[in-house]
Amino acid sequence: MFQIQPKSATFKTGVAFHEYDAQGRRVRHSIDMEFNRLTRTQYQTILDAVEFPRDDNGDLVKLEAAEFLDIQARHVADLICGWQIKGPDGEPFAFSHDNIKMLLDSYPSLWTAITSTAGAGFAGEAKKN
């Protein structure tokens, strides 16, 4: 018989993403991130809150890159609550809105990797604390 178990408020898992080096080789990276464990309702609320501006006809308004990046960073900040990243100096890279924006700007494929991992975690596919 199934028994409901208490769950932790967060879960940790690696987020894999790729970029290409100067020689055109695909390079795989992984960042250990801590995600908020969300209920279905909480997850849907976060997805619904990602609003892109529309004009009077309901068509999407073209955003400046910085505006789009800020929307993405706010969305990511709702999904994750920490990470294990070292800065260029080898010191821990602080978890902050500005640093989320910097990472998303520097590694464009990271946005998709984070949101996909959050969805997998919501579906119970990510490893738990």
Image: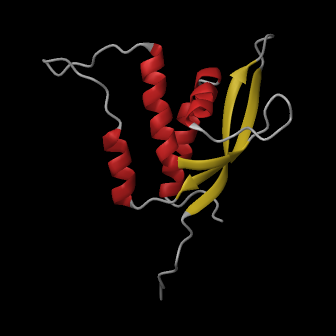
Determine the residue located farthest toward the bottom in the rendered image.
Answer: 1
Residue depicted at x 75% and y 31%:
28
Q: Which quarter shows the C terminus?
A: bottom right
Give the farthest residue toward the right. 90
The residue shown at (55%, 35%) is 97
Give residue 26's quadrant in the image.
top right
Relative to 118, does residue 26 appear above or below in the rendering? above
Viewer-closest of 95 and 33: 95
How many numbered dots are placed on residues in this image?
0
Up-down: is 119 above or below 128? above
In-image side of 121 versus 32 (left or right): left
In the rendered image, the vertical position of residue 77 relative to residue 112, given as above or below? below
Residue plotted at (47% across, 17% down): 66
Across and down, in percent, residue 99 comes to 63, 32
Q: Position of residue 95 (x, y in %)?
A: 64, 42
Using the image as rendered, state which of residue 112 and residue 72 is in the foreground: 72
Residue plotted at (63% across, 28% down): 103
Q: Position of residue 10 (x, y in %)?
A: 57, 61
Residue 49 pos. (x, y %): 33, 41
Most foreground residue, 13 or 120: 13
In the image, 93: left or right of 36?
right
Colouring scheme, one of rainbow, by chain, secondary structure, one colour: secondary structure
